[in-house]
Image (cartoon, rainbow, N blue to C red):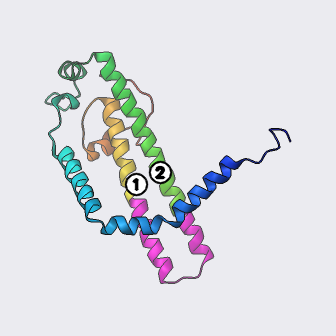
């Protein structure tokens, strides 16, 4: 019998181990939920995370603006201890991230809404359909708000000026974000 004809025991062992993990998951988690040491350890984790959230942000992590709200790249670079091209690269990366966030939110919201519409057409009207419709509406509105926030941040980086949502909607040529743009003041 050649080496190619031998059965693969490694894969079978892995499947067996995963099956045991799945079969014993609930008893393990039930024990951890009632185990005083585990509860104390999780409480300590929560205290540490809270301390991290409450810690003051370093000054170097902020963007410096002038009194009109325009982003001052040179001063931001100086305060952060970076050079100007590095700050411009960080702003360009922020622009790409906000564009990706915008399109991801729009895609998920659209897919969720269209799947709900298809399910509503295919099923008879009942309370469960109304409930799922309300949940879908809430999810769609939440994702829409997040997409609008991402578009606002993208616009702020494009024009190098901090502005409100109202300013963005009144003055932007488009609400669609750009993945690339000039990071130079106009």
Residue 130 is covered by the magenta coloring: yes
Rate crowding at label 2 as few (under 14), some (14 to 19) or many (20 or more) other CA atoms within 10 Å: some
- The image position of residue 174, as x and y in percent, is 41, 40
Magenta span contains residue 5 = no
Q: Is 35 on the left-hand or right-hand side of 176?
A: left
Q: Nearer the viewer, residue 82 or 114?
A: 82
Q: Which residues are magenta?
A: 114-141
Query: Residue 40 at x, y = what percent?
Result: 23, 59
- On the question of residue 184 being in view, the answer is no
Q: Is residue 69 above or below residue 118?
A: above
- Residue 165 is marked as none
- At x 51%, y 51%, the residue is 107
Rendering quarter of residue 65: top left
What residue is pinned by disc 1?
A: 144
Give the farthest residue toward the front: 1
Closer to the chain start, of discs 1 and 2, is: 2
What residue is shown with label 2?
106
For numbered disc 1, what is the local secondary structure? helix
Expressed as whole percent of the image width and height from the top left, the position of residue 16 reads: 61, 58
């Amino acid at each position: 019998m050649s080496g190619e004809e031998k059965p693969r025991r490694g894969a079978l062992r892995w499947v067996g181990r995963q099956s045991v993990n799945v079969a014993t998951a609930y008893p393990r988690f039930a024990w951890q939920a009632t185990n005083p040491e585990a509860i104390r350890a999780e409480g300590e984790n929560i205290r540490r995370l809270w301390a991290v959230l409450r810690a003051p942000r370093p000054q170097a992590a902020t963007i410096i603006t002038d009194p009109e709200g325009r982003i001052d790249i040179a001063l931001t670079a100086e305060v952060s201890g970076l050079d100007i091209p590095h700050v411009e690269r960080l702003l360009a990366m922020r622009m790409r991230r906000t564009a990706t966030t915008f399109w991801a939110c729009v895609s998920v919201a659209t897919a969720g809404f269209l799947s709900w519409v298809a399910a509503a057409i295919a099923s008879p009207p009942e309370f469960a359909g109304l409930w799922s419709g309300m949940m879908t509406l809430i999810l769609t509105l939440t994702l829409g708000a997040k997409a609008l926030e991402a578009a606002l941040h993208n616009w702020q980086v494009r024009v190098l000026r901090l502005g409100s949502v109202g300013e963005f909607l009144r003055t932007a040529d488009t609400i669609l974000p750009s993945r690339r743009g000039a990071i130079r003041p106009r």
